[in-house]
Image (cartoon, rainbow, N blue to C red):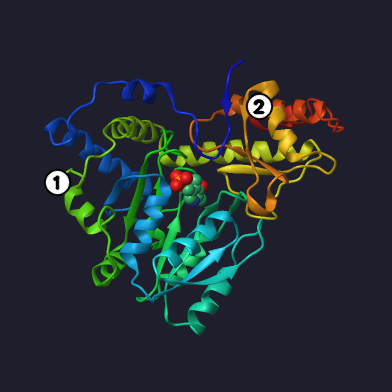
Amino acid sequence: MKSYLFTPGPTPVPERVMLRMAAPIIHHREKAFETIFEEVREGLRYLFQTEQEVLTLTSSGTGAMEAAITNLFSKGDEVLVVRAGKFGERWGELAKVWGISPVYLDFPWGEPADPARIAEHLTTQPSIKGVLIQASETSTGVMHPIREIAEITSKRNDVVLVVDGITSVGVFEMPMDAWGIDVVITGSQKALMLPPGLAFISLSEKAWKMVNSSTSRHYYFDLKKHLAAAKRNQTPYTPAITLILGLHEVLTMLKTEGLQNVFARHHRLAEATREAVKAMGLSLFAKSSPSDALTTVLVPKGVDGLALKKTFLNLYGITVAGGQEQIKGRVIRIAHLGYFDQLDMFQVIAGLEMSLYKLGFPVELGSGLKVLEEKLA
Ligand SMILES: *Cc1c(COP(=O)(O)O)cnc(C)c1O
């Protein structure tokens, strides 16, 4: 049986990227590396739609989230944490560990944040120095209105908007400079089609000013050190050289396809999948504003969500993600981000139809597949 990976991270790695990473290791203090890294830096600026430096860290995505917290804020600072899923919670946990006080702004799981409520908080609590949020909350499959929120924060000199873009960079439009976002973060194993191990972070001028006045301490994730090294096409410590070779290949692929086409492809696959799921008589977990990175499907009444996930894997070799924490067993999450194309969606929708059928749910076989064909043909 073949294996099919449909999780919103890690995601499948293209063959040409795997081949590139099979090349012999080179030394990172040599010219050969610097030439590649210079092109990588340029490719990352294109991807983030920024003129700022995009720093490459050796860690999973959470490392860049922690770097944002420790570099921007100082002990005792207050930050507004938008909490509408598991990754929103992570911002709060990270802040607390470093002695930074999270002020929580909660929205129900499955719903997007309301920018007006954020504006309200910033007015009534002028001590807040940052707004921490996800662009795409991967635990619920909902997209937050980053553009509208950036309109609010960019008018203030003393507040930065920090966006965990781990399932949005390379998925949908979120131009960092044009929208006035202060910090954008992503990781390698999502839309960047690479194995886990790299995290990326870019900061606006306003954010760098805050970094320069922070009294917080750090060593490995000292972003000022990373910035200085990057300007020389270097990293302060040994980078994940092999992953950077793969990244070089990925950035070439994205540039060749064109960012707008990359976004359109994700949207098309996500939209077709959402319609297919509804045609099968199922509902989406996202009440509105579904992310194009993944589709979160409510497990229908009478079906055991954990059994559904197991059936997918055991009978069809398909790995999908389940629900986390309060929605464990209640949803399955199907990824569209990264190296997916039209026919891939037929595998996962066929898997969903057959798994539900096997579990005794009265699904009409072919009902989802038919809609996929209609949408994609
Ligand atoms: C995957 C993910 C993370 C965590 O990234 P790791 O690479 O597991 O550290 C954080 N935020 C979002 C929105 C994610 O999807």
Is 308 located above or below residue 18 in the figure?
below
Q: Residue at x 83, y 44 (%)?
A: 301
> Of the residues shown, which amino acid type is indicated by label 1?
Arg
Dividing the image into 4 quarters, which one contains the N terminus? top right
> Of the residues shown, which amino acid type is indicated by label 2?
Leu
Q: Nearer the viewer, mark 2 or mark 1?
A: 2
Q: Are marks 2 and 1 in contact (CB under 8 Å)?
A: no
Is 128 located above or below residue 327 in the figure?
below
**Mark 1: few/some/many CA within 10 Å (<14, 14-19, 20+):** few
Q: Is mark 1 within 8 Å of ligand 1?
A: no
Q: Is residue 308 left or right of residue 118?
A: right
Report x, y in % for residue 349.
69, 30
Q: Tell me if residue 215 can be seen.
A: yes
Secondary structure under the numbered disc 1 in the rendered image? loop
Report x, y in % for residue 265.
53, 36
**What residue did someone put label 2 on?**
313
Secondary structure under the numbered disc 2 in the rendered image? helix
Is 281 located above or below residue 90 in the figure?
above
Is 59 located above or below residue 149 in the figure?
above
Residue 54 is tagged as none
Q: Residue at x 31, y 63 (%)?
A: 71
Question: 150 and 68: which one is in front?
Answer: 68
Q: Is residue 208 left or right of residue 171?
A: left
Report x, y in % for residue 321.
61, 39
**What residue did someone put label 1 on?**
232
